[in-house]
Structures are given as structure tokens and as C-alpha cells.
Image (tube, grey):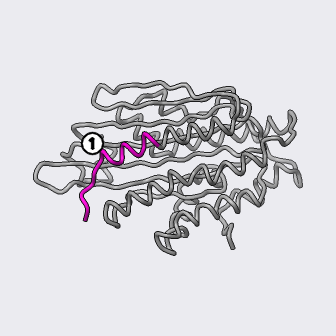
Amino acid sequence: MGMPDSSKVKAFLVALQQQICQGLEKLDGQANFVADSWERAEGGGGTSRVLRDGAVFEQAGVNFSHVTGAKMPASATAHRPELAGRSFEAMGVSLVIHPRNPYIPTTHANVRFFIARKEGEDPVWWFGGGFDLTPYYPFREDVVQWHETARDICQPFGEEVYPRYKKWCDEYFFLPHRGETRGVGGLFFDDLNHWEFERSFDFMKSVGEGFLNAYAPIVERRKDTAYGEREREFQLYRRGRYVEFNLVYDRGTLFGLQTGGRTESILMSMPPLVRWEYCYSPEEGSPESELYTDYLKPQEWLA
């Protein structure tokens, strides 16, 4: 059972943030990330990198954080009583990309590591993460390619891994009050510690490093698609679902806010522009209605 080494995980995450930012700058071709480092009074800190007003990306945020604490927040010990009385370390890279063109999907990815220690006892640790895709005007080939990449990442770790984490993603990114998924899913995993440390870490690395391979080809295919006011209005309306999910259900957002994380970094996932419309419903047979009828429910994309 290799002992967990948090310094190794941290070094990987810092490098991953850099690698993803460089990849996104290359895709954008115009704007650059601006870094903003912060410290947390209770321990730890991080660096938020944000790209704004790019040629391709209206806003992209790639956040690295490493926070430590002498004791767990009550919200965490409620569903994990074994963490009570332990100090903790939580670290991760989290990103959200809001493209300008409505034909390019919004996307989110996250990889994280958590460890809680107590004198004289084995540490409690796990990895989590995943990535998901939120199109406005979806193309089936994009969704299939996204899921093929996700499956290929999981393949070396066992046949059952992709189906399990794909299903978990569909269930996690679901808005019960809307009765729809947030997008077309991807991978979601948490509490990963049933493999020994090195193998669990390898899986987390594969997900982190595989994200751009899944997303970049979609951006390249769609970034020059012409669009007008109608598509833009629909994109801003659908971005509202993103906000609803993150503020009501997202565990990372809630954990961050409850543990006194840096508010600006936690909320950098929010789209720069968004709109709500009372009782909106898409015209039957329109491109907008296709999103609702064909995409916002869990399905086997690789069938």
C-alpha cells in the first residue's frame, strides 16, 4: 500500500495548471492568462489564472489551490465521521471555460487530492475529479469523440471504470429542479482509494492530462462557425443552468465557501455574462429544441 505522498501530487498539479493554460492560450491565439496568487489565513493558498476577452474564450479560469486546516468543517464530518479530529490537506486543479462562440461547448474539469491525518493512525486519503461538457448547439460527433477520449483514459485501469464514472457523471451533473442533465457528461469520480496510492494517482494524472485531448479538437472544429444574435441569446440563457448547478448543488463550491476558501477563485466558474428568461421554452423542431430532446438526458453515446 504505497504511503500517500502529498508533495508529489502537489508538484504534478502545479505543472498541470501550467500545461493546460499554455494549451488554452494556443487554442485562443490572442489572449493570455493573468495569474493571481492568494493565501489563506488558516493555512495554504493557491494561484488562480484567468484569461478574459480572448478571440475564442470569453473567459477561462484555471485554478490551483492547496489548503490545510487543523480540523474538518462540520459539513464534511457529518457524512464522514471518521474525519473528525483530524487535520487535513486538500489540493486540486479546477477549471471552467466559457467560449464566446455558442457552437463551442462550455466545459469544466477538476482533479483533486485529499488527505486527513491524526497522530498514531493511518492517514485517510482519496482522489477525485473528472470532466464534463456543456454544449448549446451540440454535434453528435463532438459528443462521441469526447466520450471516446474519456473511455480511452479509463481503459488501462479496467473495463468497468469508464461505465462506472460515466454514470456517476450523469448522476452528479443533474439538475433535479429542471429535470435535465447539465450537459452531455463525461467522467466523475470521488473517494478514489480502493487501488493503492500510486495506481490511484496514475488514474488522476491520466484524467488531468487527458482533458485537453478531449476538448481541443472540438474547439478547433467549431471556432469558426458563424453565429448571430439568436444563438448568442440562447447561449446566455443556457449559461444560467451552469450558475444554478454550481450555486445549489456543486460540492466543490460548497466545500470551498464553507472552509473559508477564496471567494473570487471559487466563483471564477461563473460565466461573465448570463441571462434568465421567465418560462422560456424552445420552438418545436428548432435547433434549440434539439438540445432538450436529444441531449439533456443520460444515454450511451458509444453504443
Secondary element under disc 1, as helix, strand or loop, is loop
Pinpoint residue 174: horizontal percent, then vertical percent: 59, 54
Residue 176 visible = no
Residue 253 visible = yes
Q: Is residue 2 on the magenta stretch?
A: yes
Residue located at (77% from left, 38% from top): 101
Q: Quadrant of the N terminus?
A: bottom left
Q: Above or below — where is 18 with respect to 120?
A: above
Q: Above or below — where is 206 with respect to 219?
A: below
Task: Quadrant for residue 252, please give it.
Answer: top left
Q: Nearer the viewer, residue 115 or 155?
A: 155
Q: Above or below — where is 147 with respect to 175?
A: below
Residue located at (66% from left, 69% from top): 300
Q: Which residue is mark 1?
A: 72
Pinpoint residue 169: horizontal percent, then vertical percent: 55, 58
Q: Is residue 154 on the magenta stretch?
A: no
Pinpoint residue 85: horizontal percent, then vertical percent: 18, 45
Q: Residues in magenta?
A: 1-15
Q: What secondary structure is the magenta-colored segment mainly?
A: helix
Amino acid carrying label 1: it is Met
Residue located at (48% from left, 44% from top): 16
